[in-house]
Amino acid sequence: MASPFRLKTALGDDVLRVHACASREALSDLGETTLTLLSERKDIRAAELLGKAATLTMALRDDAPRQLAGYVTRFAQTGFEGRHTVYQMTLRPWLWLLTRTADCRIFQEMTVPDIVRAVFDDHPVARHEFKLMRAYRPWTYCVQYRETDFNFVARLLENEGIYWYFTHDEAGHTLVLTDAASAHDCAPGCESLPFYGSSANVPPELEYVDAWITQESLKPGKVVITDFDFERPSSSLEKQQDRTRDYDLSDGEVFDYPGGYLQAGDGAQYAEDRLDEIQTAYARFDGDTNAQGVRTGHLLSLERHPRDDQNAKYLVTGTTIQMRQAANESASGESDLRCRFSAIPADQQFRPERRTPKPMAPGPQTAIVTGPSGEEIFTDKYGRVKVQFHWDRRGKRNESSSCWIRVSQPWAGKGWGGVSIPRIGQEVVVDFVEGDPDQPLITGRVYNAEQMPPYGLPAAAVISGIKSKTHKGAATTSCRWTTPPARR
């Protein structure tokens, strides 16, 4: 009897025969598929497969075959079984390849979906589809700082409440990014499954759910966030969202600062997303099935459950597939497949957990002040300047090299204080508010070999003072004082 499991690789169809499979997928999770394989070839080298695409087709039902596709990221020879050599292969999605690339990069005036597209454009294997139902604000300034492309993309999507999953077909797999419960469809060929207890007498050809666990958890019911805008320092940006459940102690409050926004409307959306995130799994369901078609990111209806309120539509949030078949292709034993899945009510909005850490700028850096060609001073009404960071490979050392950055001054009063604008070409000390690379702040200035002190050192070490230079000129004005040696 022909095997219901077929593996297509760079070696050709069925050179490697599937003996066992363990596959894990979940919303906003990379997942992986591990295959135990048999082959009559004893000399397959990892180099023949690593980095190449492979697709597993499961056809326990002829009318609805199911694929699991990915790239080979690990290949091992593990032993022998009769006349076959045993191999093990790990498949991961193309998005996993972004964990193997890292960068330092600045994005300006772009929405998160546009930033993500720009990162994906640098990866030829990227195959993706956006199914977004709402508009997103442009980020004035967003920095990828010493982090992998995957971590950068993942944390931005998590911050905006965008989540993702993969669809598979014979041509490969596609990353689907979405933000709304209404964007999900039923899995082809697996729109609904009946429930039968494990002791039920069920025809062997029937696909069904034989275990179903329902659980609810106590979650906070209120989120409060706020932020600070220096252009409106007296304005409150506090926003909150409430959603208590019909059980005791469901009114717990979670407060956070900074909220990562400057507009009240954005704050309201973020507060709602944070509450969705917290309450995503307040009601969770876990099932076991023999069906091959249950897919993460798709809808599934449960039928025939003895509790009527359980016979409803659910969003599948994760799957774990275990499959095994006889090593001997002529053996009469049937192939066995089990799928354990998790789900939430279809009308409950899923939001990803913000688990990807944002990199910190652990200490001050220096940078070079920049501006338009031919200018010497480039500033705005707040005395802010722009800089070229030493790690920015793409910067053009011009007026677009960074966002406007505030400059610490000796005094800063209402119409009074000290002002000294760093000039183009000077080296400045840059720190970051709460260590956030997206929030630079100039705290000092330093000399270097191209910008030397005004008094010859170390000979003039006893001289202190201030020396300014005319704009686009050579004339200088100075105020200096000398500390004479002590009298004996």
Image: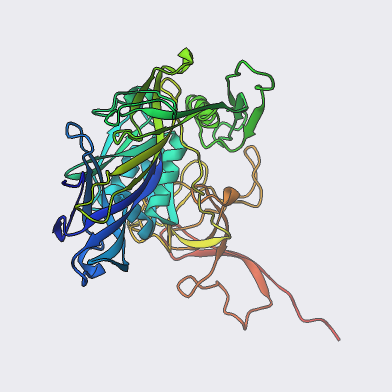
Above or below for 232 versus 479 = above
In the image, taking residue 3 as reference, residue 141 lies left or right, namely right
Q: Residue at x 26, y 68 (%)?
A: 46
Q: How is the image coloured?
A: rainbow
Q: Residue at x 22, y 58 (%)?
A: 52
Q: Residue at x 46, y 36 (%)?
A: 352
Q: Is residue 112 visible to the viewer in this orientation of the structure?
A: no
Picture coordinates of residue 161, whole percent (x, y): 44, 33
Residue ranking furthest to the left: 12
Quarter of the figure with the C terminus:
bottom right
Picture coordinates of residue 372, whole percent (x, y): 35, 53
Picture coordinates of residue 336, whole percent (x, y): 32, 43
Picture coordinates of residue 481, whole percent (x, y): 69, 70
Seen from the viewer's position, the closer of residues 246 and 406 is: 246
Looking at the rendered structure, the number of numbered marks drawn on it comes to 0
Residue ranking furthest to the right: 488
In the image, taking residue 325 as reference, residue 342 lies left or right, namely right
Q: Is residue 245 visible to the viewer in this orientation of the structure?
A: yes
Q: Give the quarter of the image for residue 135.
A: top left
In the image, taking residue 364 as reference, residue 286 lies left or right, namely left
Q: Give the quarter of the image for residue 51.
A: bottom left
Seen from the viewer's position, the closer of residues 72 and 368 is: 72
Seen from the viewer's position, the closer of residues 176 and 273 is: 176
Seen from the viewer's position, the closer of residues 45 and 362 is: 45
Above or below for 53 versus 479 = above
